[in-house]
């Protein structure tokens, strides 16, 4: 097999993150076969060949329907594109050349299947066999296979084909790079024997290569411990997620002669989780002077990162920033051992301020470090940490040092008055110090080894408030720490994310996770629900749990309240109505009658855990299914639980059939219901305060629904057209429509 460069692998990784925006509900019944994205703009085509041409170099093509290629010409790839099979099938064969897809010179085809069910296929239908993918047209043509199933040969007699995923009915092991293998079923998977890390399911035998391939915006997962005798730093990481999985990267030496080398050099916005970096094997001081585990930047997050240094030679995390970028660096639940500087930050020239948007260090342990942290950031918080024998430099005002334990000869040195120094525990052998220019320090409200602060503990600091102190480590009235623990439960097999933060921290909820056979709806926290990307202010220990809905829905089972005896039941003239079995639908709920109606009518069911999930967002696939059932269509057949309903909706001109698992807005749902009702004319106008927010394509449908009393506003009269439709609201709308 031909060699694969790191640059090529990086391009491969970048292709993994291409996505398509939702098709607006204004589409008519002539659903296009292909979606095309070029230069950031999306359009649609009925021909795959024209879609490829329209995409141009760097564009994307996504199948919306099965496609049969022209037997005269096959499918010629004349542009470097990404082709998403999207669960659909390309079938056929070039009648003379016996190939389905072939790539011209200087062009690269990246082919994947981003459907949830992973049912995308490319099939050579010739009874004589032939090639399903081919680069035989040119020596510099290329194909990168990331997913899909393939029936036919792969021909790279002139160009290069790299297989990183997918399933094949022929032997493609010679096209699979190190770190991957073809299993007995024909599927290309990780080779656990040699792969040390993966990027979106693609295995790598070099951790550094995996990080480079994921940058920017990808996810790296360590699969095993890595011992590296010689390491070259990775530059300008941006937006990657590094999941260490509890594994260790041991660095034995560095290859660069530059000073201030680092294992990872950040350009900002990265997440490092559950990773150990062991720098204890570094060489002589001349080779490792100033070596850092991380050069951090604005927006970086470090959670459960463990760094072992080598005394005076190393920094743990050294944070710099870009002026104008308000994102903080967050270091939470980490451990630092034997680092000269555990956490350092760089001041701007001529000031004691850094260009970081903030520096939040919480729930960390510092052991045997010369300096636990040097706080230059204007908005720095050192909260709930434990320091054994290290020094904390508080450089200026606007900073807070709260809820920490300083022990075994630790020092806190003030160069300016901090905004807050409170609820800390200072052991008898630890002390405060102050620069000669530092103002008086308020030290009240701390614990001083069981009594009043001693002269040794106060050190050289000029202090006030020392007569107000706590006499027990628990402060006598609660927890020492002012930190909170945040737990994110994914519920899909991924390890829970757990980190510490300061009270009042604004946490941005993660992107929607994925789970086979389920649809993610929202993040649940007590009685509150959060969409991905929403912000929650943390004031107590908090747990966020992913809420999932399984497909197909759990069948509704009514519980009769009438006589237990069967004969008695037959004779009962007017038996009581069946009750609901859903624990989350109270008889007092405003939507109880609506839920009872849609379940009894067979229009909606419960979800995976036997609840109804009234607050969960409705997906487009659910809407297709509801409307199809309302029309009497059979939704029980098909490749997926919703495929029959989707086909019905497309055929009836109700929907475009796109983005099945995406949440649907209220105006999109109303528009589909309006089309099902025959597109009746609206009488009147929408007087809601947010009427101007209704999309143009939804105006007539929303006007009809509001004027007919099908859609009701909130206490202010707002109809929230762009808000996601909940399952409870959908049930109510369906019942009102049936009664209308």
Image (cartoon, rainbow, N blue to C red):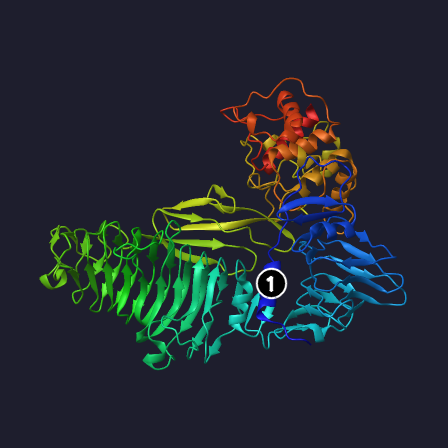
The answer to whether residue 557 is seen in the rendering is no
Q: Residue furthest left?
A: 455
Residue drawn 45% across the image and 73% down it: 248
Judge whether residue 3 can be spotted in this image. yes
Q: Quadrant of the C terminus?
A: top right
Q: Which residue is more in the foreground, 361 or 125? A: 125
Residue 694, placed above or below residue 517: above
Residue under label 1, please give it: 11
Circle 1 packing at 10 Å, graded few (<14), some (14-19), many (20+), is: some
Rendered position, 89 above or below 567: below
Quarter of the image holding residue 607?
Answer: top right
* The image quarter in which residue 130 lies: bottom right
Kindly identify the residue that appears in the image at 19 percent across and 54 percent down. 416
Relative to 364, 667 lies left or right: right
- Residue in the image at 61% along x and 19% along y: 685
Q: Tag 1's secondary structure?
A: helix
Q: Is residue 313 above or below residue 416?
A: below
- Nearer the observer, 573 or 300: 300
């Amino acid at each position: 097999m031909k060699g694969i460069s790191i640059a090529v692998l990086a391009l491969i990784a970048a292709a993994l993150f291409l996505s398509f925006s939702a098709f607006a509900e204004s589409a008519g019944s002539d659903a296009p076969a292909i979606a095309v994205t070029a230069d950031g703009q999306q359009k649609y085509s009925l021909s795959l060949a024209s879609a490829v041409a329209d995409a141009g170099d760097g564009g994307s093509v996504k199948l919306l329907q099965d496609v049969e290629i022209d037997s005269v010409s096959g499918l010629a790839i004349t542009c470097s594109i990404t082709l998403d099979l999207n669960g659909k099938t390309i079938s056929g064969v070039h009648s003379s050349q016996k190939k389905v897809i072939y790539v011209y010179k200087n062009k690269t085809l990246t082919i994947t299947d981003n459907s949830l069910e992973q049912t995308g296929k490319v099939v050579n239908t010739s009874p004589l066999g032939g090639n399903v993918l081919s680069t035989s047209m040119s020596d510099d043509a290329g194909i990168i296979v990331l997913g899909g199933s393939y029936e036919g040969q792969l021909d790279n007699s002139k160009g290069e084909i790299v297989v990183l995923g997918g399933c094949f009915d022929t032997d493609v092991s010679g096209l699979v790079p190190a770190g991957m293998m073809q299993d007995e079923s024909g599927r290309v998977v990780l080779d656990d024997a040699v792969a040390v890390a993966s990027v979106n399911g693609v295995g790598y035998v070099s951790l550094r290569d995996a990080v480079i391939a994921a940058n920017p915006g990808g996810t790296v997962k360590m699969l095993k411990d890595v011992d590296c005798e010689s390491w070259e730093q990775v530059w300008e990481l941006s937006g990657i997620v590094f999941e260490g999985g509890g594994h260790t990267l041991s660095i034995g030496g560095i290859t660069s002669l530059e000073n201030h080398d680092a294992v990872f050099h950040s350009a900002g916005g990265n997440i490092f989780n559950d990773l150990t970096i062991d720098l204890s094997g570094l060489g002589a001081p001349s080779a490792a002077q100033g070596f850092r585990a991380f050069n951090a930047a604005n927006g970086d997050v470090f959670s459960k990162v463990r760094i072992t240094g080598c005394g005076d030679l190393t920094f743990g995390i050294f944070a710099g920033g870009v002026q104008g970028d308000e994102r903080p660096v967050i270091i939470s639940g980490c451990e630092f051992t034997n680092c000269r500087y555990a956490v350092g930050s760089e001041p701007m020239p001529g000031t004691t301020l850094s260009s970081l948007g903030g520096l939040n260090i919480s729930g960390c342990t510092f052991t045997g470090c010369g300096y636990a942290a040097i706080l230059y950031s204007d908005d720095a918080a050192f909260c709930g940490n434990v320091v054994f024998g290290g020094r904390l430099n508080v450089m200026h005002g606007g900073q807070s040092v709260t809820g920490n334990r300083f022990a075994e000869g630790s020092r806190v040195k003030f160069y300016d008055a901090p905004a807050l120094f409170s609820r800390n525990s200072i052991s008898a052998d630890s002390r405060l110090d102050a620069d000669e220019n530092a103002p008086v320090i308020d030290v009240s409200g701390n614990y001083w080894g069981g009594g009043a602060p001693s002269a040794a503990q106060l050190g050289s600091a000029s202090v006030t408030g020392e007569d107000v102190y706590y006499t027990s480590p628990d402060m006598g009235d609660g927890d020492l720490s002012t930190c909170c623990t945040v737990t994110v439960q994914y519920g899909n097999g991924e390890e829970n994310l757990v980190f510490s933060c300061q009270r009042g921290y604004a946490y941005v909820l993660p992107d929607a996770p994925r789970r086979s056979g389920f649809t993610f709806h929202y993040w649940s926290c007590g009685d509150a629900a959060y969409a991905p990307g929403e912000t929650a202010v943390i004031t107590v220990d908090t747990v966020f749990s992913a809420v999932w809905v399984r497909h197909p829905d759990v069948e509704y089972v009514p519980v009769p309240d009438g006589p237990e005896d069967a004969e008695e039941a037959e004779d009962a003239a007017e038996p009581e109505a069946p009750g609901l079995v859903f624990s989350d639908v109270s008889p007092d709920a405003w939507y109880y009658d609506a839920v009872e109606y849609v379940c009894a009518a067979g229009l909606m069911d419960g979800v995976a855990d036997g609840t109804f999930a009234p607050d969960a967002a409705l997906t487009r696939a659910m809407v297709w299914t509801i409307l199809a059932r309302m029309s009497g269509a059979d939704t029980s057949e098909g490749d997926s639980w919703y495929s029959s309903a989707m086909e019905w909706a497309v055929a009836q001109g109700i929907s475009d059939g796109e983005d099945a698992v995406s949440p649907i807005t209220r105006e999109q749902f109303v528009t589909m219901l309006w089309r099902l009702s025959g597109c009746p004319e609206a009488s009147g106008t929408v007087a809601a305060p947010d009427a101007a927010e209704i999309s143009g394509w939804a105006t007539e449908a929303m006007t009809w629904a509001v004027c007919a009393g099908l859609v009701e506003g909130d206490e202010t009269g707002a109809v929230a057209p762009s808000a996601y439709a909940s399952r409870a609201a959908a049930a109510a709308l369906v019942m009102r429509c049936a009664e209308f």
